[in-house]
Image (spheres, rainbow, N blue to C red):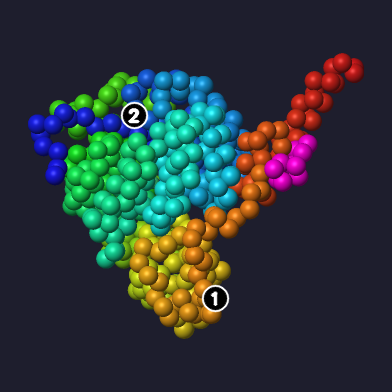
Amino acid sequence: MAKTNADPKKVLFTETVLRDANQSLIATRLKYSEFKDILPTMDKAGYYSVECWGGAVFDVCLRYLDEDPWQRLRDLRKNLPHTKLQMLLRGQNLLGYKHYPDEIVKMFVQKSVENGIDIIRIFDALNDLRNIEVATTAAIKAGATVSGTLSYTQSPVHTLQKFAKLAKEMEDMGVATICVKDMAGVMTPKEAYDLIGAIKAEVKIPVVLHTHCTTGMAYLTYMKAIEAGVDIIDTATSCFSGGTSQPATETLNYALKQFGYETGLDDAVLKQVNDFFKPIRDAYIKDGALNPKMMATDTDALNYKVPGGMLSNLVSQLKAQNAMDRFEEVLIETPKVRKDLGYPPLVTPMSQMVGVQATSNVLAGERYKNISKEVKAYCRGEYGTAPAPIDPEVLKKALGDEKPIEGRYADTLEPVFEKTKAELAGTAKSDEDVLSYILFPQVTEKYFAARKAKEEKIVKYTITPVEE
Ligand code: CO
């Protein structure tokens, strides 16, 4: 089952400093202007790919950085001409937080590839493959390499057989690689060894592993995954590694080479990349945007079986309600709610939904007295099929006599592109602009206004000397 020492020893690296490390440590606040000078160097490092777009990058560019995410992508493409640019896509949710009509999914994927993306990692929080199918087919058609992605979680229904079967179904859909995505950083070395082995036995295509250092296990987890035959791992340049981020690129490269693995990485270039990002990291620590705690090991997630990011959300929810004395009760309630809801993986948006429900169940003094509209939508089947059946009593409380939807939620959504484009005539300058607006209407509207103000200012300055 596992790869033996006699097999060719090759492990490839995806560098995450521009996306996941950036997102996990400093809430995706890296500006393009901060890292653009290192791109020509990164282009020579020998990475399998650079993860640089998607996830929260798109939203944050528009919301906080006054940057057009499409322009960032085109600039990345120009300055990393020999490197595969990789993005993360939440299936039918694209980069937003709700489901979009198929028309928008196809167009968004097509435009991402046109503007420079090579590899699209596509996942669904519930592992409901109907939610990744349209994006996958569109991406393959557009010429992208698709990495079919499994959202990793532990539960009685998430067995090795179940994950291996999902991987096989993705391979049959035509994806080029399978990625096991441990968003919460909870995968143990043993689980990695068993799971990667089970998937490698089922599929012929390369397998990727993604994890986070949060609980301190990631290096061991990668090592055992490599022993089981994993082909590609996600790492971050060392000064942006550790804690809630990925393991360090240089460290794993050094260790693996000593074992005789070929990594394709250039040690001298890796050092230059790290030296470039060090003062940037230090500046973020100094201004408080990067809390050094984020880079340390926190084993609470192992004790509570709740991902690290979710724990900090629970704490801030309870603090806001002056109810920190109920923390232990909420922690005991959280896995119960998850079980009631059919064991959804605790990733966005499920982690928020389960956390809020658990808090409400404890503070209201009665379970499911209040149910959020998101949990109701989940029960209705709008997010896809739950991994296990939802508890019938909870379903009844959430929906009353209403029946869950049959089929796929996106099938009920009307096309919106042409209508939105017409509404934005004069404001949107491209189809990409229209797509940004469809994903994040308020945020993009604000961005358009700021862009217009900036342009008028530029025009005024260039005109002034002529007038004088
Ligand atoms: Co991640």
Residue named by callout 2: 48
Image coords of residue 151 (percent x, y) = 36, 52
Q: Is residue 419 magenta?
A: yes
Q: Magenta span: helix, strand or loop, mainly?
A: helix
Q: Secondary structure at mark 1?
A: loop
Q: Secondary structure at mark 2?
A: loop
Q: Which residues are magenta?
A: 418-427
Left or right, 302 with respect to 228, comes to right
- Please give the count of numbered marks on the rendered protein: 2
Closer to us: 241 or 451: 451
Q: Is residue 315 magenta?
A: no
The numbered mark at residue 402 is 1
Q: Of the residues shown, which amino acid type is indicated by label 1?
A: Glu
Closer to us: 4 or 260: 4
Vertical side of 401 occupied by 284: above or below? above
Closer to us: 336 or 39: 336
Left or right, 194 with respect to 398, comes to left
Image coords of residue 445 (percent x, y) = 70, 45
Can residue 362 be seen in the rendering of this structure? no
What distance separates the C-alpha of mark 1 from that of mark 2?
A: 49 Å
Instruction: Please name the residue shown 21% across and 53% down the image.
Output: 191
